């Protein structure tokens, strides 16, 4: 299983969340730092679209680990909740295309 770690201690607001995500997921330089773009970049991890440095196999899952999630929850709880909500939506998108959900979230 592929794993990506986000440093929750470095995430204090929406902009720092997107900066940390761009680093961790290998988003392109053109990534516009919006949640719509975050969703789009993680919706095609099994395709060769160039939206992330991560490529998953047909049944592979990306394990997203938020380290220091307590610090993130304290300083950017709304961002953490929106990320979790978006992961649910992304997995539903994969299921709509007849694929296995691709993302799993773990808070540490």
Image (tube, rainbow, N blue to C red):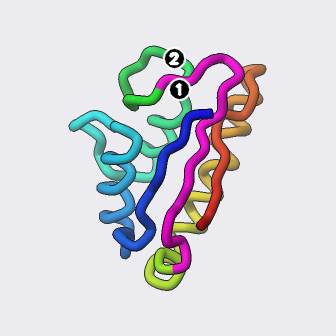
Residue 33 higher or lower than 67, as above or below: above
Going by the image, does 59 lie left or right of 68? right
Residue that carries the numbered disc 1 in the rendered image: 44
| Mark 1 and mark 2 residues within 8 Å of each other at the beta carbon | yes
Relative to the observer, which residue lies in front, 106 or 87? 106
Residue 103, quarter of the rendered image? top right
Label 2 residue SS: loop
Which residue is depicted at the point 56% across and 55% down?
65
Q: Residue 86 at what x, y percent from top left?
A: 60, 51
Which residue corresponds to the image point at 40% horizontal and 41% vertical from the top-left? 25
Which residue is at a point 74% across and 22% down the rendered structure image?
Answer: 99
> What element does badge 1 sit on?
loop
Q: Residue furthest bottom?
A: 74
User: What span is colored magenta in the figure?
Assistant: 55-70
Q: Is residue 53 above or below residue 48?
A: below
Residue 30, quarter of picture: top left
Query: Which quadrant of the view contains residue 94?
Result: top right
For the C terminus, the image quarter is: bottom right
Mark pair 1, 2: CA separation:
5 Å
Toward the viewer: 7 or 94? 7
Please tell me the numbered disc located at residue 47: 2
Q: Is residue 104 magenta?
A: no
Q: Is residue 69 magenta?
A: yes
Tell me the quarter of the image containing the N terminus.
top right
Dot 1: few (<14), some (14–19), or many (≥20) neighbours within 10 Å?
many
User: Vertical placement of 67 versus 77: above or below?
Assistant: above
Assess disc 2: are there few (<14), some (14-19) or many (≥20) residues with their C-alpha within 10 Å of its C-alpha. Answer: some
Where does residue 83 sit, x and y in percent of width and height? 55, 58
Percent x, y for residue 67? 50, 64
Up/down of 54 relative to 58, above or below: below
* Residue depicted at x 54% and y 42%: 3
């Amino acid at each position: 299983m592929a794993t990506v770690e986000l440093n929750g201690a470095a995430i204090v607001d929406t902009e720092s969340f997107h900066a940390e995500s761009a680093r961790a997921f290998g988003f392109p330089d053109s990534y516009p730092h919006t949640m719509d773009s975050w969703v789009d970049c993680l919706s095609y991890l099994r395709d060769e679209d160039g939206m992330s440095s991560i490529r998953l196999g047909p049944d592979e899952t990306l394990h997203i680990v938020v380290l220091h999630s307590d610090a993130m929850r304290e300083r950017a709880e709304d961002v953490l909740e929106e990320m979790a909500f978006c992961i649910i939506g992304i997995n539903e998108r994969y299921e709509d295309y007849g694929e296995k959900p691709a993302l799993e979230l773990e808070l540490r």
